[in-house]
Amino acid sequence: MPGTRYALEVQPELPEPLARLRELANDLKYTADRRIRGLFYQLDPELWESSGHNPKVFLRRVSQGRLEQASRDRVFLEEYHSVLSAMDSYRREPVRPEVAEHLNPDKDLVAYFCAEFGLHESLPIYSGGLGILAGDQVKAASDLHLPMVGIGILYRQGYFSQTIDANGHQVAHYAPNRFDDLPIQPVCDAQGNEVHVEVPLGPDRVEVRVWEARIGQVPLYLLDTDLSSNGEEERAITYQLYGGDNRVRIQQEIVLGIGGVRALRAVGVAPSIWHVNEGHAAFQALERCREHVAQGMEFDTALELAASGTVFTTHTPVAAGHDIFDPELVRSHLGELAEGELGIDTQRFLALGEGPEEEEGFNMTALAFRTSRYHNGVSRIHGGVASEMASYIWPEVPPEENPIGYVTNGVHVPTFLAREWDGFFDLHFGGQWRSELANPEFWQGIDRIPDHSFWSLHQTLKSELFQAARKRTARQIEHQGGTQAQVDRITRFLQPDRTDILTIGFARRFATYKRATLLFSDPERLARLVNDAERPVLFLFAGKAHPSDQPGQHLIQVIHEFSRKPEFEGKILLLEGYDIALARKLVTGVDVWLNTPEYPKEASGTSGQKAGINGALNLSVLDGWWAEGYDGENGWAIAPHSSELGAEYRNREEATELYELLEDQVVPLYYSRDGHGYSARWVRRSKASVKSLLPRFNSQRMVLDYLRSYYGPASRHHRRLAKEGGQPAGELARWKQKVATAWPGVAMERIDDTPEEIASGEPLPITVAVDLNGLSPEDVRVECLVGVTGDRDQFLIKERHGLVPLEEGTPQGWARFHLDFQPSMPGLQFYKLRVVPYHPDLAHLHETGHLLHL
């Protein structure tokens, strides 16, 4: 229709009895609290859906009449006041005892930096797993009342929304966020002026506005350069998440890191622990060094002091996940900071970001490692992979002994557990189950739930998934130019009242290492599987590929093409527009969650955890979290083949194992109904999934692991080095310089007899001589490592013993160290001798990277 269309929004006034709805709409606690979201849903279910589950938008558009009616509705008001009472109680709760055991709530505060936060679809500043994990981390911190603030970027356009055209091509759509629609507000000072900070970009400065979102107890500060005081290029820095070229990326990371520290200072926040979640925010440590140098401290001392309180989490074993910038780009943006404010030359500055020898450029992951003292991967396997990848930081230390540990990721149960399970657990366990999230013993009670009740609830969730998938698929086919007949044909198995078809979900970022198309390795075999009239199978796919990732986008096209072939039409569906809302439907509604990454490239993965706590069974390669979660009863495992084998061979073998598991175990078990209308053995496995995964892979457990192993030690370490104006940090820095100078000349030799056999109960005297090259015996630790040989002829350490220095050295002036070793193991064993630099203020024995074996 011709003519101009003008928008007009008629906004209501909140009646006084409902005035605190606005407060609820501005606290992202609603993202994990179904009762809060339920208030808005009850007011107008259709508007709640059409407003994108955004409470602020909803309150601007709900009818005045409906609000007036609700303000007089006794039932609604009872629930409203109950929700408010629960919220007020939540805010008044003290710090949990397990938190107070490791942190002083009056002195300690964790600053959590991340480039994206995936809290809810109503705040679209995330792209995928990293952001969802960050969102779950701050939610769990709030639940535990752990003192924390988050720091991120407020993207004007966020990440793209996705459609898929008729040819299977991904189409990326960027729509600017209306900040008035988001649960945020600008931070203002005592005079009511917005808080802005300046951030250096080479010789220029960019002005950054600070916004605040609140997640229960945790404030999240978001940085925004879209200000009229900035030029067009500077305004565009915070437009898109992971958009633009490397110049935009480094500017974003300077804003996040340096601007994040300055923003916290400007709002009066004084963290004691700084958590860098992935390397994007690594520049924050340099800003803190600049602050110390400005107070008269040497750079090396400042670095020790800043690093002592810094935790770095690396998230990806894939090279493309690590930002590497051209040194000239770094120099042009930060050279002035290095020479003018840090007091070091550009070469020294660039050395902080040196990667492995074969790599050229300034590596942000390397910078993050060198400017932190506490480091971790995000699963047991990934911790080992990260140790290998970062071994160049500690070149003389065996990777398995370097300072990188791991904390396996977990998911925020209140966010991702279906509301139906929430109510179901209330009915069977009472409300106390929410306080038992990390208690495996408590969750054994799942077995007491009647099988038929458990199955019935899952079928309800599956019905909701089918409804949502039908709507999405219909819209998708319509904009692709399809007909209603095509819609009916493709959605014929998505019948909400017929949920007895085995439904398998695969939804994640489409990156090549995730092997989304492994399922299609043998199309004929797959066609027989899905088209079995007695035991049909439905596959639902969803996910995005980065707009610059052409191979990832090709995967989408391949799946689309398979889904439109006659033998697969209706049995394989590719849903567009993957976001948190769709993810919630999928993980709560499917029967099986499929994951086929290329080992060992799945750092952790959390989508399978979300599915597992909702009773879905994981069918996954034993990589990432699943290598820890699989117990033989809670799903199925595909054994990964060695990464040394060719990719073609590995794909063929692992695809064969996938087909065999589906044909011989998964499908027969699901359809083994035994006259019950459901498979009792399937329900048993489904219960095993919930009771084994929920207490182990939730974000509360994850945050407590960080607290015990990283936040607490970092806080204590930093306080120790900060005493007397940082004097211990200075002493440690000078000691490291002394060690670095002396170490190339350190030597060791054995000066005793070396018998290969001794009688049981007899000690083995060990004496070594060490040329310390100017170091003192107190500067080193001489160790005897005792172990056995593993299956691959590797040395497995079982015991460590220290050799003590003797008063008298050797004639040539070498120091002597001695141990009377008393073996505790019988039979054949092995031992090694080595010397390592030692200082009581090191965070980790191998922090220096120096080590000498005999």
Image (cartoon, grey):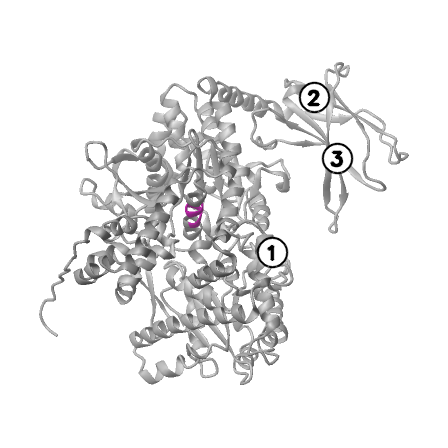
Cα separation between marks 2 and 3 = 18 Å
Task: Give me the residue at 53% from left, 85% from top.
Answer: 533
Task: Give me the residue at 77% from left, 16% from top.
Answer: 810
Is the N terminus in the top left, top right, bottom left or bottom right quadrant?
Answer: bottom left
Per the rendered image, the range of residues in magenta is 136-140
**Residue type beneath disc 2:** Asp
Quadrant in the picture for residue 80: bottom left
| Residue 315 visible to the viewer | no
* Front residue of 286 and 415: 415
Q: Earlier in the sequence, mark 2 or mark 3?
A: 2
Name above or below for residue 675 compared with residue 46: below
Q: Which residue is mark 3?
A: 832
Disc 3 versus disc 1: nearer the observer: 1
Quadrant in the picture for residue 396: top right
Q: Which residue is mark 1?
A: 627
Disc 2 versus disc 1: nearer the observer: 1
* Front residue of 660 and 834: 660
**Majority secondary structure of magenta residues:** helix
Task: Give me the residue at 76% from left, 14% from top.
Answer: 808
Report crowding for label 1: few under 14, some 14 to 19, many 20 or more residues within 10 A (C-alpha): some
